[in-house]
Amino acid sequence: MLGTARTFWRMVAILFSLPAACLLVAAQPASAIDEVLISYAGPSITFLPAEVARQRGFFREQNLDVKLLLTRTEVDRAALASGNINYSLRAGSSFVSAARGLPVRIVFLGTTKPFWGLVVRPEIKSVSDLKGKSMGVPGLLGSQQISAKYILKQNGLDPDRDIIYRIVDTGTRIAAMLSGSLDCAMMDYGEAFRAKKMGFKLLINAADFHGLLAGGLGVNSNTLRDQPEQVRRVIRAMLQALRYLRENPEGTQQVMMNWLKLDREMAADIYQMSINNYTRNGMVEESMLNSLVTSMLAEAGIKGVNVSQLTDFTLLQQALK
């Protein structure tokens, strides 16, 4: 009898402990969440895939806690090369860094055209009127300045002598133009549409002039070597975001409204102007890649570089499979 009683109470104890044990097991995550810093130039339609991945939970699905860190182009290059930041959304400056021999590789391409335009004061009628004027750009040798140089050259100006470049952060260029300290500025579509509402003129849509690999994913080479699984998960989330952009226009526009502070009409217009500027799968056809990168590096004074040595699409190809 004594043995039977002991067995009974032992079974009761086990049964009462099961719910608590189940709760503890359920509360444990399947795997640890990685905290990831990704640098960028500020809220912009160029970097929309990353924000879609953040707001729609695609990073979380990959066990990533992603923080977007606003940096200037020059700071971004140094931080990415040193490993203080492991990822950058700036494909243009990442290509420049890699071409200069810094430990950076481009692993994903999000765009094939620029998402900005040349915004000017209302009295300016043509690009030639900008000779001797000041232009706002987010950083020297970044994608927007390279784009500006291309547009100026195509319109007969010397981009190194005829324009005074001033580094002005994204989101503050309208105020600088209102104050008179800038005559024109390269602005992403969101900022450009707001400038138009305030009386300025969108003189040129850069996408009509040239292709450009502005948005993507640059990675510190040590991170790529030592944490390939984390890099692969970041890429997977970005691929999900690219699909979402095309398959869910309304959801994408809601992200744009939240992130870029747009009204519904502006979000819809910018979406229609932008959607075909994004890649479909993070890849660009090889001949186009070589042409765009070679041209971009030439604007930065870099020649004779093998483009294939600046990229590593191994993990992207694995993610696509």
Image: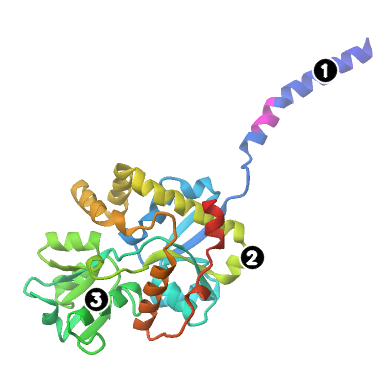
Q: Which residues are magenta?
A: 19-23
Looking at the image, residue 223 lies above or below residue 244: below
Residue 9: numbered disc: 1
Compare marks 1 and 3 and give the one earlier in the sequence. Answer: 1
| Residue at far top of view | 1
Percent coordinates x, y for residue 315 in the rendering: 56, 59
Q: Amino acid at mark 1?
A: Trp
Alpha carbons under labels 2 and 1: distance apart: 52 Å
Which is in the foreground here, disc 1 or disc 3?
3
Which is in the foreground here, disc 2 or disc 1?
2
- Quadrant in which the N terminus appears: top right
Percent coordinates x, y for residue 194 in the rendering: 18, 60
**Residue 187 is a magenta residue:** no
Mostly what secondary structure, the magenta segment? Answer: helix
Percent coordinates x, y for residue 97 in the rendering: 46, 78
Question: Image check: 251 left or right of 101?
Answer: left
Q: Measuring 64% from the left and 40% from the top, which residue is drawn there?
A: 28
Q: Is residue 44 visible?
A: no
Alpha carbons under labels 2 and 3: distance apart: 39 Å
Is residue 223 or residue 246 the one in the foreground? 246
Question: Image check: 150 left or right of 97?
Answer: left
Q: Secondary structure at mark 3?
A: strand
Alpha carbons under labels 1 and 3: distance apart: 78 Å
**Residue 21 is a magenta residue:** yes
Mark 2, residue position: 226
Compare marks 2 and 3 and give the one earlier in the sequence. Answer: 3
